[in-house]
Structure formats: structure tokens, C-alpha cells
Image (spheres, rainbow, N blue to C red):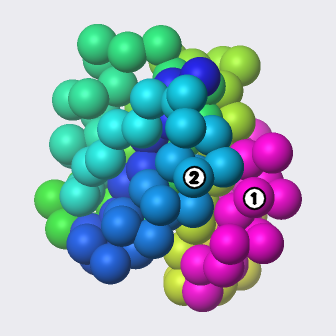
Amino acid sequence: MKCLITDDSKMSLMMLNKIIGTAHPDWEIFKAQDGQQAIDIAKDQELDLILLDFNMPNMNGGEAAKILRPQFPDAKIAFLTANVQEAIQNLAVELKIDFIPKPITEAKILKYVG
């Protein structure tokens, strides 16, 4: 399995990497700090799981998801964000991706990634 985690918070990236990496040591985990970096990493990979923060510099998670969803129609993709506005949740539905509200907890992440 190949997983891409995208968040402009280094602490969030470290937490996600530790939670997922500990539960699934055989997974390959890629890290990006904004939507554009996620797009750049994704173009050379076959990704199975993508977690996107919403509010990030350069390109937000919504813009990235609009590009990534058609590129990875079978991948599990979710917004993992503190931005819980109804408009963001509706965008997730529209893009056929999941919505996970922060804060990041081990139980929440493991429930989603399996």
C-alpha cells in the first residue's frame, strides 16, 4: 500500500506518519506540506490512500482533491482538517471523498486506514 499524507503542520505530518507507520510498517508513506507538493508526488505513484488537510499555502486540499480524485478513482481519499464548515463537508461529498475532523487521534486514523 502507498499512502500520501498532506498537511502544512510538521507536527500533524509526524503524528500521521507515526500512527500509520506503526500500524502498517510495510506501507510506503509519502509526505507533502501543501496541495501542489501532493500533486507533484502523486504523479509518479500509484496511491491507495490520500489524506489532505484543507487549509494550506500554495494550493489548498480542495484544489488538490479536484485533481487527485480523477487520477486515483479507486483510492481512499479524505479531508483531514480542522475546517469543519458545511461548505468543506459538502465539497467532500461532491468530490466523493471522506471527511475526518481534526484533532488527529490514533483511534480516528486507525479506524479510517484500517
What residue appears at the point 35 percent right and 25 percent down from the top-left corner? Answer: 42
**Image quadrant containing the C terminus:** top right
Give the vertical position of 16 relative to 106 (above or below). Answer: above
Q: Is residue 40 left or right of residue 29?
A: left
Examine the image and state in which quarter residue 25 appears: top right
Q: Which residue is mark 2?
A: 22
Mark 1 falls on what kind of element? Answer: helix
Foreground residue among 19 and 49: 19
Q: Nearer the viewer, residue 8 or 66?
A: 8
Q: Is residue 39 magenta?
A: no
The percent position of residue 87, horizontal first and vertical second, equals: 64, 74
Q: Which residues are magenta?
A: 92-114
| Residue 81 to residue 50: above or below | below
Which residue is under mark 1?
110
Tell me the kind of residue under disc 1. Leu
Query: Residue 74: x and y, percent?
Result: 71, 19
